[in-house]
Each structure stands twice: as C-alpha cells, then as structure tokens.
Image (cartoon, rainbow, N blue to C red):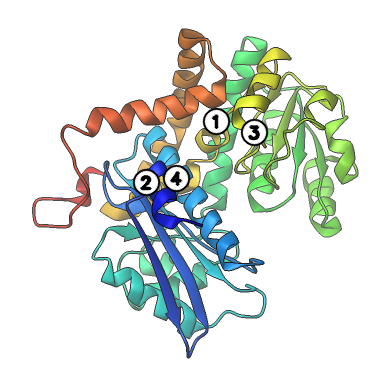
C-alpha cells in the first residue's frame, strides 16, 4: 500500500502506529478529519490476517466515523483505533494502558471508545493513562455500555423509515426480521415488542436466539433463511456487506433499517438496486449513531437524560436524508453521505484542523 497516496485521496490527517513489546500491543490509530472538532471513534480488537488488512479497516472505519458524527450533528471529527490480536486470549491491562499513553500523546486530537472486541473494562484501563476516552464505567461518571442507547436510536430510525415506506411511523402489527441477536438487536427487539411488532430472528448463537424467543415471542429461522421471509422491515444487526447481488433479489420487505455497519457491499450499485425495487433503505451510519451520540455527551459531563433527548434527533436526521434523496434524485445511501459532506464543508471556513488550546472548548460538542 502507498499509504500517503491513500491518505491524500480521502484526505486523512494522521495515522499513528503503536507498539509495546512487553504487553504485545500492536495498534493503528487513524484520524480522518477534525474539521468539526476532536476525532472520536472506537477501539476495535480483531485477529486480522495481516497488518495491511488491519490498516485498511482502520482507515475505512475512521472515515465512516467522520460521516456518522457529522450527520448526527455532533461537533466532533472521525477516527478509529484497531488492535491486532484475539480479544478472547490476547488482552491485558498493560496492553490497554500502553494504548492509553499513546492516545494521551495526541493531546486531545483523538478520543477513543468501546468497539468490537473491547469492553467497558478495557476503557477503564485506558482511562488510567488518559482522560481522552469515553464509555468507561458508571463509577467513573461515564455512560457505560453504549448498546442500549444504540438500540434506542435504531428504534427511532426505524419508525421514520416505516413512515417513509408505509405512510406512518406506527410499528404496531408490523413484522420485523432481525438478523442478529446480540446486545443491540436484543435492545431493539424489546422496543419493538413493547410497541406490538412481530419479530423474526436469526443468529449463529442458539442461546441468544432462545432468549429472543422466550423474552419477546420471536420466531426463529436459520441464518440464510432471513433473506427470504415475508416481513415489513429487514433489520441487519450483525454482519456487514449483506446487501449484495445475491441477497437483494430475495428480499420480501418494504424497508431496511438496522444497526450493522457497511450493510451495502457496493454503496452505489446496491443502493440503486434497492431504489429500483422501491425498498426504502435507512443508511446504517445514520441509523446506528445512538452509541456515539451517547458517549459524545461525556465530553461535557455526562447527563443521560440529555443524551437520550439527543438520540431522539436521529428521527429528524433520517427525515433530512429522505428529503435530500428526493431533492437530488439519488439513493438514500448517497443522500446520507451528502448530508455529512454538506455539514463538514459548511464549517471549513470557520474551523481548520482541530488544535487543543485554551480557546477550543468541548462544551460545544
């Protein structure tokens, strides 16, 4: 990989390679854009097959966070950390404290959070070395596990998506096919069940499926069958790239709205396929922004009620996406990108690269 060529093409600001021989830390911090403020993005730990694969993931995710944060109306930029390693066996307190020291050296340009393969306990370890971390435990005065708030945001986004597809946002009696039964999917199922929706679920974890069936009366199907079920809304809450040439023609739904990242294998091609089939698509980084909205509130002293009120605005952001899609005759996936880009570009004249100083305050986040 010609790293500087890649960075120039998508205008990345900084890539930091971190290693600590004693703890075994091998990490990459990618900072994409700080036009709106310090870059916030989670710390992912994964057993990547190669260092290049890890770098590609860090870069891709960092840019995605820029768009997510901008579209959510937050005054923060986008970044991501990836740690190369198996989260089930390679973790240690020393590893995350070493990472915390690297984050501290960035002097506030980057703020980390929980992500795939990391936990609240890991964030607590990072917090021992730097204040530039969110999602630590309640005992630290922070917000803790972001999954319930992410699920709430998906629920609000789904109601607005339903309004676009069916004329109103009432989910009572609607059938929702949920792919995945993890923390966010389970939280979403609770909201749907409370409103009187019917749930179809699949997952590779039978225990997780059993909980959904027992707690919310869900109907379970095999993993590959989820694309063929008759439903009103499909909610991808597990893997990425699941909307592709093979799966889109099989769908028997009017709308798609779920929490998983990068659902479209090819944004242009598969976003258009959904548009041609008149399937209303809720863009993932708008839909799943509840978690980052929640942890961003920590930057000004966490207030859960205030954070949850902000999460409700995901409904309004979805409204803007649908308006842009109609205005410009483009797919909703392209409209979500445009919403983020328009906000960033509007700020270029008043904010340059974020610099931590006595006049730059996180109180505006």
Would residue 362 be found to the left or right of residue 235 on screen? left
Disc 3 designates what residue?
266
Q: CA distance from mark 4 to mark 2?
A: 13 Å
Residue 67, by quadrant, is top left
Viewer-proximal residue among 208 and 55: 55
Please determine whether, in this image, residue 107 is positioned above or below residue 337.
below
For the residues labelled 3 and 2, say whether their Cβ atoms are less than 8 Å apart.
Answer: no
Residue 165 image offset from top left, x and y in percent: 65, 14
Query: Which one is in front in this view, the residue at disc 3 or the one at disc 2?
Result: 2
**Image point 60% across, 74% down: which residue?**
85
For the residues labelled 4 and 1, say whether their Cβ atoms are less than 8 Å apart.
Answer: no
Residue 102 image offset from top left, x and y in percent: 34, 73
For the residues labelled 4 and 2, say whether their Cβ atoms are less than 8 Å apart.
Answer: no
Viewer-proximal residue among 252 and 23: 23
Would residue 40 be found to the left or right of residue 322 on screen? left
Viewer-proximal residue among 16 and 264: 16
How many numbered circles are shown? 4
Disc 1 designates what residue?
156
**Image point 48% across, 43% down: which residue?**
64
Check residue 242 in the rendering and tell me which mark sits there, or answer none.
none
Query: Which one is in front in this view, the residue at disc 3 or the one at disc 1?
Result: 3
Q: Earlier in the sequence, mark 4 or mark 2?
A: 2
Residue 164 image offset from top left, x and y in percent: 60, 14
Q: Residue furthest left?
A: 358
């Amino acid at each position: 990989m010609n790293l500087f060529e890649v960075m120039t093409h998508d205008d990345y600001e900084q890539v930091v390679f971190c290693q600590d021989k004693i703890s075994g830390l091998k990490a990459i911090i990618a900072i994409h854009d700080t036009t709106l403020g310090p870059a916030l993005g989670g710390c992912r730990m994964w057993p990547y097959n190669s260092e290049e694969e890890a770098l590609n993931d860090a870069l891709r995710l960092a840019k995605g966070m820029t768009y997510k944060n901008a579209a959510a109306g937050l005054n923060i930029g986008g970044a991501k950390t990836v740690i190369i390693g198996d989260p089930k066996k390679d973790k240690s307190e020393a590893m995350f404290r070493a990472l915390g020291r690297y984050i501290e050296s960035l002097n506030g340009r980057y703020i980390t959070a929980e992500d795939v393969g990391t936990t609240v306990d890991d964030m607590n370890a990072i917090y021992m070395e730097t204040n530039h971390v969110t999602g630590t435990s309640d005992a630290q005065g922070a917000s803790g596990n972001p999954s319930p708030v992410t699920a709430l945001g998906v629920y609000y986004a789904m109601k607005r998506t339903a309004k676009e597809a069916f004329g109103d946002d009432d989910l009572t009696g609607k059938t929702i096919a949920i792919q995945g039964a993890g923390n966010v999917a389970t939280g979403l199922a609770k909201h749907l069940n409370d409103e009187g929706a019917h749930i179809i679920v699949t997952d590779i974890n039978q225990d997780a499926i059993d909980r959904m069936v027992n707690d919310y009366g869900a109907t379970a199907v095999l993993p590959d069958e989820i694309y063929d079920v008759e439903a009103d809304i499909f909610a991808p809450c597990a893997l990425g790239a699941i909307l592709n040439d093979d799966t889109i023609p099989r769908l028997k739904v009017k709308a798609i709205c779920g929490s998983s990242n990068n659902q479209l294998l090819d944004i242009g091609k598969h976003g258009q396929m959904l548009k041609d089939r008149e399937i209303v698509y809720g863009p993932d980084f708008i839909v799943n922004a509840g978690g980052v909205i929640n942890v961003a509130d920590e930057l000004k002293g966490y207030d859960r009620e205030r954070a949850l009120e902000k999460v409700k605005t995901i409904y309004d952001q979805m409204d803007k996406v649908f308006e842009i899609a109609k205005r410009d005759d483009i797919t909703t996936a392209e409209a979500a990108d445009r919403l983020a880009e328009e906000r960033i570009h509007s700020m270029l004249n008043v904010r340059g690269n974020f610099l931590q100083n006595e006049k730059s305050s996180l109180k505006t986040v």
